[in-house]
Amino acid sequence: MKKDVKPVNSLPKSITIFGRSFRIVEKPHLKDEDGKELCGLYDSIKREIKINSKDLYEVRLSTLRHEVVHALLDLSGLNEILSVELEEAIVRCIENGWDDLGKI
């Protein structure tokens, strides 16, 4: 009997954050409303994290982590008290230290 095996370089199809399920959608040439190409986008209304599928796996994984941190800040309400610049600095700090967190 053949098991369904997840490809080595694939992202999960969904993630649960603070008890809420979010779909992870990989889409080529992901763009914002101004037509600027993006690596990723967190959408709290649709409960989706969109990832640009044309990027390399390592970039897609880093982007997923980045968008998950945005989701954590949004769902906790902390983004309401942060400037855009400070939120982005916090997100990048956690995104870049993510691998080290697993070594604690």
Image (cartoon, helix red, strand yellow):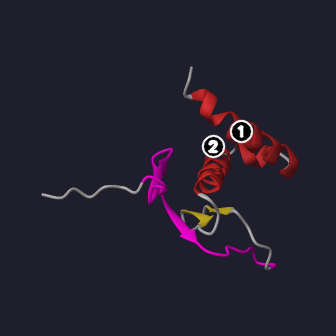
Find the residue positioned furthest to the top: 104
Q: Which quadrant of the structure image shows residue 5?
A: bottom left
Residue drawn at x 49%, y 55% as measured from the top left? 9
Q: CA distance from mark 2 to mark 1?
A: 21 Å
Coordinates of residue 79 in the picture (x, y in percent): 74, 47
The disc labelled 1 sits on which kind of residue?
Answer: Asn
Q: Which portion, as a residue range, is magenta?
A: 8-34
Instruction: Judge from the rendering whether residue 65 lies leftward or rightward of residue 89; answer left or right.
Output: left
Towards the viewer: 102 or 78:
102
Label ID, residue 96: 1
Instruction: Residue 29: name its quadrant.
Output: bottom right
Q: Residues within 10 Å of mark 1 (few under 14, many from 20)?
A: some
**Residue 76 screen position, x and y as percent:** 63, 43
Q: Quarter holding the N terminus? A: bottom left
Determine if the magenta segment contains residue 38.
Answer: no
Asked if residue 27 lies in the magenta stretch, the reply is: yes
Residue identifier under label 2: 76
Q: Earlier in the sequence, mark 2 or mark 1?
A: 2
Residue 82 as seen in the image, left or right of residue 55: right
* Residue 2 vs residue 65, the one in the foreground: 2
User: Which is nearer the eye, 56 or 18?
Assistant: 56
